[in-house]
Image (tube, rainbow, N blue to C red):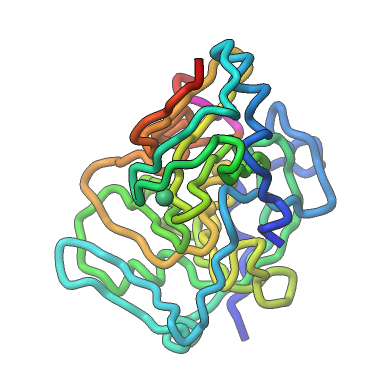
Amino acid sequence: MADERRLDGNAIGGLMLELFGVEMTTATGVCRTCGAADLVARLEVYMDAPGTIVRCAHCRAVLMRIVRAPERTWLDFSGLRSIELPR
Amino acid sequence: MPVISRGFRGRRGEGPSDRIPPGQHRVDDFPVLSAGPTPHTPLEQWTFTIESGAEPVTWTWDEFRALPREEVTVDIHCVTKWSKLDTVWEGVSLDTLLGHVEHDASYLVAFCDGGYTTNLPLEHVTDGKAWVAYGYDGEPLEPEHGGPARLLVPHLYFWKSAKWIRGFRLQDEDEPGFWESNGYHLLGDPWQEQRYWGD
Ligand SMILES: [Zn+2]
């Protein structure tokens, strides 16, 4: 079933650290579609598709799309209105 | 009885090694890839719509199932590097569907339950190259594999074979879909290894 494929935002912690050098799971993302603010760790993550998809836990909108090729990575965070990082 | 067709296989030789595109390996199971939760649209609410410049054409589930159907046996190739040979599908060819629409478009964008989209040139989905499939291996297509109906474009990477399809828009211009707008190739020919932008 699909929901057994669903991970939480901790699943992208290592990837974000690798790409940006930032611990992102404790950041707060705001959904551009419904306005919900949630810790990245609480977002819904699907990783078995051709890329990694992060969805809003409230309205299921796509917040982040991450595609990794051997020598390139594409990031679309346009589903997020903001990301707040703790210092 | 459905029309039996071997379907369009792209470049295909006799032995299995000639049927596995570069960079792919053969699998015997059928991996499930999902970018989101599996939709479960009740069949009585399901419709299939072709949008073009003119009035949209819409079929209900029962009307769609009454369209001429074909059974095809094809090889499929996922961009995550697995290929599966001799998969058997049942559905309606895009030639049949497009025969109901007056248009002079060159591209389509398929749209789906769950919000997924993918773009295709019409020349790659006509003349027996693409279907909207509702049967797999003699059974109704399971939701996790895209049921009640998915697009089937076997000669391109399988992300083009959009799960949970509900229709398509005919367009003059190519418009990148869900994956094509963030790194994946606009066309996705596995024999050319067109995986990513610039491949
Ligand atoms: Zn939301």
Report the front residue among A54 and B77: A54
Magenta residues (range)? B191-196
Count all numbered tags in the image, as a single digit.
0
Question: For the point 27% across and 56% down, which residue is it?
Answer: B170
**Residue B108 percent across, percent down from the top left:** 33, 52
Q: Quadrant of residue A14?
A: top right
**Residue B56 percent across, percent down from the top left:** 23, 71
Q: Is residue B196 above or below residue A56?
A: above
Q: Is residue B199 above or below residue A10?
A: above
Q: Is residue B152 above or below residue A26?
A: below
Question: For the point 51% across and 55% down, which residue is it?
Answer: B162
Report the front residue among A35 and A59: A35
Report the front residue among B2 and A33: A33
* B188 magenta-colored: no
Question: For the point 68% across and 44% down, which residue is it?
Answer: A7
Q: Is residue A42 above or below residue B49?
A: above
A44 on left or right of B178: right
